[in-house]
Amino acid sequence: MNSNYIALYLHIPFCVRRCLYCDYVSTTDLSLKEEYFNALYKEIALKGKKLKDRKVRTIYFGGGTPSFVEEEFIFQTFRTLQEHLDLSNLEEFTIEVNPESVNEKKVHFYKEIGINRISMGFQSTSDKILKTVGRSHDFNKELESYKLLTSFYDNINIDFIVGLPYENFDTVNSNLEFIEKMKPSHISYYLLDSSHDTPLKHFLEIKEMKLPEDDLVYDLLDYIYDQFEKSEYNRYEISSWSLPNKECIHNLFYWYNLDYVGFGVSAGGYINKKRYVNTSDVKAYITQLNDDKLPYRTKKLNDEFAELLETLFMSLRLTKGITYDSLVQRFSKNLVDNVLNQLKNNLEEYISIDDSIKLTTKGLNFSRLVFEKLLDIAPT
Ligand SMILES: C[S@@+](CC[C@H](N)C(=O)[O-])C[C@H]1O[C@@H](n2cnc3c(N)ncnc32)[C@H](O)[C@@H]1O
Ligand code: SF4
């Protein structure tokens, strides 16, 4: 990848309602929408000044629910990007949509402004699960919206989560049947993370809701991996499967630890070895930008060790991992060998270290454990 390329992420923090399991920053209070977007345009203008010599390769509108806001806001955001950044090398332009808030007029507009990839969140095809976790759509709406998208796009990702309440082999099979029949070009299949402070966590604690047993979830995961193994999809990242040449280029920037710039509340970025995260508070985000200040919550410059560990952390998510040569080109050989020796000693079954450093099948399937252990590594 050309090292002058960058990826752009824009966070659109508005949702029809909040799903019980979700920890991402978003609000149902639409009264702040106008002010929020004005602040977002300002952030793009401020950051754009320092990015004049960089070429944008991908744009990703994520959320929240970008399809829930009117076209004029997406249009103006795109125009502001065009005005302040070099988009002449743009290859992939994605927007996240939800089944209940996407319609023909919007999809037509997305196509017109050059969006060439759509990511739609299903999470499940089971109406019982969807209703239980507070989704604003049912399976029929998913089908209707998916069919609408396919009349405009062939590059479509669908998100699923495994392990929600009422999950079982039947619900997983119905998700896999949808995939088998409709063949979206990309699937993200995530394992539910219930550790965050969400309404779901509260309902689990007071025993008003129950998750499937861990053993069942591991069996379901094995089953999902096996079914994909027999299909035309290629697993190229822990939770991502694609048809040939339909990998998500934007996410590859994260996984190869390449430069990306995040705009909007809670968005993160990594540019010229500096990593930052914006404030998670929508009102604070607006106020700081109204005062011409960049709305950072944290900002740090990585030293070489942190840089190497982050590169490993991200690239081990990819099934092909990262090559030894590319690591020693970026970092000192002594440091690389030191860290790889520690990995060998602590995680032998989970990581294979050869010309490439990558997770074994066991490592891919138990990646949370591997990443916890990676945090224990220190320079010696
Ligand atoms: C922040 S959401 C935005 C997408 C869109 N608003 C939606 O609801 O489909 C991005 C994706 O993260 C995943 N996700 C959100 N919360 C999760 C959780 N607690 N555990 C695992 N995956 C989660 C879902 O698959 C979701 O589609
Ligand atoms: S999962 Fe999507 S729609 Fe639901 S609250 Fe989170 S961002 Fe909003």
Image (cartoon, rainbow, N blue to C red):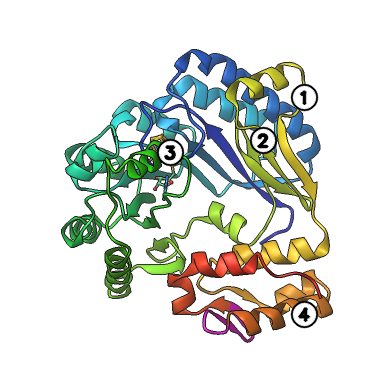
The CA span between labels 4 and 1 is 41 Å
Quote the CA–CA distance across marks 2 and 1.
11 Å
Residue 173 drawn above or below residue 25: below
Q: Is residue 40 above or below residue 141?
A: above
Q: Which residue is mark 4?
A: 338
Task: Report x, y in % for residue 56.
Answer: 65, 45
Distance from disc 2 to disc 4, alpha carbons, whole Å, reads 33 Å
Q: CA distance from mark 3 to mark 4?
A: 39 Å
The amino acid marked with disc number 4 is Asn
- Decide which of tag 2 and tag 1 comes sooner along the chain: 2
Query: Label 2 vs label 3: CA separation?
Result: 21 Å
Instruction: Name the residue carrying label 3.
Output: 198
Picture residue at 55% right of the left edge, 52% below the top: 250
Would residue 287 be found to the left or right of residue 100 on screen?
right
The label nearer to you, 3 versus 1, is 3
Q: Which residue is mark 2?
A: 278
Say which of 232 and 141 sits in front. 141
